[in-house]
Image (cartoon, grey):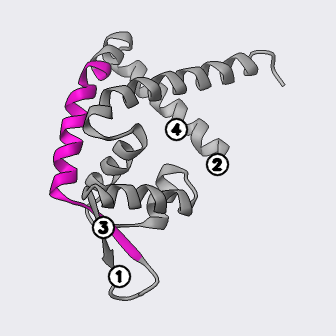
Amino acid sequence: MDQKTIPLLAALLRGSRLAESRLDAMVAPMELSTTKLLALRHLTDSPEPVTLGALADCMAFVKSNVTQLIDRLEAARLVRRLPNRDDRRCTHIEITERGKERQAEALAAIRPLGERIERLFAPEDRERLTTLLQRLIEGLR
């Protein structure tokens, strides 16, 4: 193993923890967490309701963790479960209007952090960093 790999991993972990901690603090007033916000974002971006399995894959979670996450979001009336007409064993999830409103509030709250990142990196650097991190994610799956 290259001697620079350990510091790289340490920097990735530290950056990830720091980013999640800052985001959690910024969305806490909306009774959200980074994880909940990312789930709402995925549901908003999806043109159709999403299965629990698809959401678990997207978020790199096991299905039982996503089930618990959706239970909490549903209790807060931010998402709703929809039965699958073709398969009774399968449930689809969609974001509610309240969920869309809460997500919009959270995105407004984290805007300063996004702007800070935009000041740190030129657009092409952000694009390259995103590409590299996505490659890392795929390589670790």
Is 1 located above or below residue 138 in the figure? above
Residue 84, labelled with which disc?
1
Magenta highlight range:
91-114
Residue for badge 2:
141
Q: Earlier in the sequence, mark 3 or mark 2?
A: 3
| In the image, residue 110 lies in the stretch drawn in magenta | yes
Residue type marked 2: Arg
- Under tag 3, what secondary structure? loop
Q: Quadrant of the N terminus?
A: top right
| Residue 6 % position (x, y) | 75, 20
Residue at left offset 23%, top offset 28%? 109
Classify 10 Å Cα crowding around label 1: few (below 14), some (14-19), many (20 and above): some
Residue for badge 4:
134
Residue for badge 3:
49
| In the image, residue 112 lies in the stretch drawn in magenta | yes
Classify 10 Å Cα crowding around label 2: few (below 14), some (14-19), many (20 and above): few
